[in-house]
Amino acid sequence: MSGYKPVAIQTYPILGEKITQDTLYWNNYKTPVQIKEFGAVSKVDFSSQPPYNYAVTASSRIHIYGRYSQEPIKTFSRFKDTAYCATFRQDGKLLVAGSEDGGVQLFDISGRAPLRQFEGHTKAVHMVDFTADKYHVVSGADDYTVKLWDIPNSKEILTFKEHSDYVRCGCASKLNSDLFVTGSYDHTVKMFDARTNKSVLSVEHGQPVESVLLFPSGGLLVSAGGRYVKVWDMLKGGQLLVSLKNHHKTVTCLCLSSSGQRLLSGSLDRKVKVYSTASYKVVHSFDYAASILSLALAHQDETIVVGMTNGILSVKHRKSEVKKDSLPRRRRPTYRTFIKGKNYMKQQDDILINRPAKKHLELYDRDLKHFRISKALDRVLEPTCAIKTPEVTVSIIKELNRRGVLANALAGRDEKEISHVLNFLIRNLSQPRFAPVLINAAEIIIDIYLPVIGQSPVVDKKFLMLQGLVEKEIDYQKELLETLGMMDMLFATMRRKESTSMLEHTSDGFLENKKIES
């Protein structure tokens, strides 16, 4: 017994995304707060001024939320029909909204009744924004028109009729009060200049345009539609810089981080992708429970708000940095105390005695040493071990299988004990690093407990789930082997023909080495 060797815990490579600075930055959010709205959340917009409230447009209401509140602090509901969009003015004091009846309404945040009503569109308004001078409003609607409104006089200034389909998105330049961009279902993105009464630039996106975004400098334009996110250089006449296709479904919304170095896109595939504006590569990704319609970031990226088709508003707040209280340090021995005698040289008459270091066995190793196989398996199936260090549990299962006693360790368990085993297998069976060991263990459990199925509904449900996972994993591995066989055949046909060499006499009498392909 003194020669027992502890079980070697095999280290498995952890498969997943590489930990980068972006991963740490975008994962540094608390658990999301979910708020239920009355309908699909079509628009979310943050105020650029403290206290950084945000407006949520859903159904026939516009709710104003405080950044950390879960209940609306103000509601605007005086719409004849569904409201589609709402945008804050730069100073955060006014809010402009568009609705399905073609109306554009201006609200004061401190009041409830609309200050101004702009009537001129004949169909639903899906895009509204303030110009840079704060005294004009741009709107786009399903009547194919784009209108510019004067706030003090409540009058229409200009109407542009260059689009041939619904105008569903747009934004105004932050630097020039005469420039604004609109995107339409006619696959085009147009930049209009109020001084020329016509568009000054038009680019072809190739898909119905769902969202557009101008960089703060005004030099770059981003358009989203279909599965594509495209970046255009406005200073070069609308030259296409890059076309991104990282989503599996239609991209519905765009957002820029506070630093301007990261671009975010939301899609109907329930994902939010974060791109670097330097390389335009995906540096991070968020997963959500439903298709995404709207997306917004607060000042300094402190809060990220996502609106979904099921009416759920997901709000994530950044974790605050907790400063550790500086405790008085206990005085410890000096460095000389630890190295005392370290450099002592052994003399001729000295006898060197090495004290062997005592090895302490883990609890599961002690059980294995005394042949308590079921108890050793129970120890590694406890949640503290099975969840945090599943590789330890898998190593013990592998060791029991090597000894030929895995079936004995798994047999004779009650409902609670077998539930622990089934939970672990269901959670880790699909992981490639554990699959070879756990599939064998799952087959043993199915053989042992199949005759007693039907005595516990909880175990029955997990048992059927495990059986389905095993069958699915086996089919998956068969498909991989078939694919591997096809790849081997392709590589074999692409292999270069072997060449042979032979010696020939040249005209000058020397031998020449020639290669002949067989």
Image: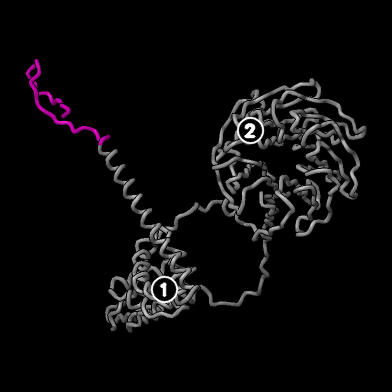
Find the residue positioned furthest to the front: 454
Identity, as a three-letter code, of the amino acid under mark 1 = Ile
Q: Vertical placement of 8 versus 28: above or below? A: below
Of 93 and 147, nearer the camera is 147
Quadrant of the image containing the N terminus: bottom left
- Residue 190: quarter of image: top right
Identity, as a three-letter code, of the amino acid under mark 2 = Pro
Q: Residue at x 75, y 42 (%)?
A: 84
- Packing grade of label 2 (10 A; few <14, some 14-19, many >=20) is many
Q: Is residue 360 visible?
A: no
Quadrant of the image containing the C terminus: top left
Question: What segment carries the magenta color?
Answer: 493-518
Q: How is the image coloured?
A: one colour
Q: Residue at x 74, y 35 (%)?
A: 171
> Residue 31, image x and y in percent?
64, 61
> Residue 37, image x and y in percent?
73, 54
Residue identifier under label 1: 453
